[in-house]
Image (cartoon, coloured by chain):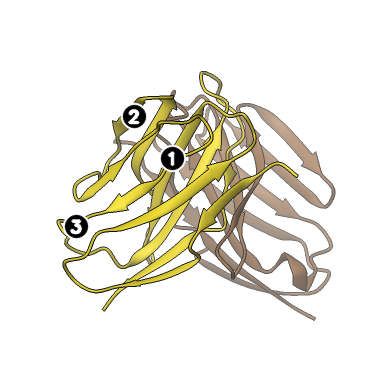
Amino acid sequence: KNEVEQSPQNLTAQEGEFITINCSYSVGISALHWLQQHPGGGIVSLFMLSSGKKKHGRLIATINIQEKHSSLHITASHPRDSAVYICAESGGSNYKLTFGKGTLLTVNP
Amino acid sequence: DGGITQSPKYLFRKEGQNVTLSCEQNLNHDAMYWYRQDPGQGLRLIYYSQIVNDFQKGDIAEGYSVSREKKESFPLTVTSAQKNPTAFYLCASNLAGYTGELFFGEGSRLTVL
């Protein structure tokens, strides 16, 4: 059974700090997703990657297939980055994503 | 603007009543999904549909039903058989047959009184 573990569960940072959220999964994947959920509940897709590294603005996602591990980095964090960050992996099918429980990030001004 | 619209955002139901949550997308996506989110747990798949007039059960389909009569619409009915229906429900879509980016609606919060 696929399992997705995220760490930390909760993270508090000061504005400007560099943030790292980790995601480990148990079986081989075809794609790993990073999602952002704001307090209102809506979810936005940040990245989908199957190898290497992707960057969008201040967000960077990396994945190590051999170690079954992915990280989401936020540079120069800002209070508006406060949200729950969720990773999900497909295990070969985008119809059967397995989701982590999420990391609650709070960035204080 | 293209996107997914869920309604209602908040819904209260008495025990024994069926309720239907609406999900409409104008992204021309073939695949649509319904997920349930409970506190402290990851999203869990209820039903998914890859094409019009076809859908498959996810991991927690008991007590739920869906239909896919139109490409843009994928309503979810929470029946009285669902033992613990109070939850946050999210609809999503993406291009079928492609491991692609998921697009989510804003969610519907159902509370059973």
Instruction: Locate residue A18, reporting x and y percent.
Output: 77, 61
Amino acid type at circle 1 is Phe
Badge 2 or badge 3: first in the primary sequence: 2
Residue at 27 percent across and 44 percent down: it is: B65
Q: Which chain is brown?
A: A
| In the image, residue A29 above or below residue A39 | above
Image colour assigned to chain B: yellow
Is residue A27 at least partly visible in the picture? no
The chain under label 3 reads B
Residue that mark 2 sits on: B55
Marks 3 and 1, how far apart at CA: 19 Å
Residue that mark 1 sits on: B74
Quadrant (top left/top right/bottom left/bottom right) for the N terminus of chain B: top right
Instruction: Locate residue A56, reporting x and y percent.
Output: 80, 43
Amino acid type at circle 2 is Phe
- As rendered, which of B38 and B16 lies closer to the eye? B16
The chain under label 1 reads B
Badge 3 or badge 1: first in the primary sequence: 1
Name which quarter of the figure residue B61 lies in: top left
- Please indicate whether residue B52 sits to the left or right of residue B5 in the image: left
Residue that mark 3 sits on: B82
Q: Which mark lies nearer to you, 2 or 1?
A: 1
Badge number at residue B86: none
Is residue A78 at least partly visible in the picture? yes
Amino acid type at circle 3 is Gln
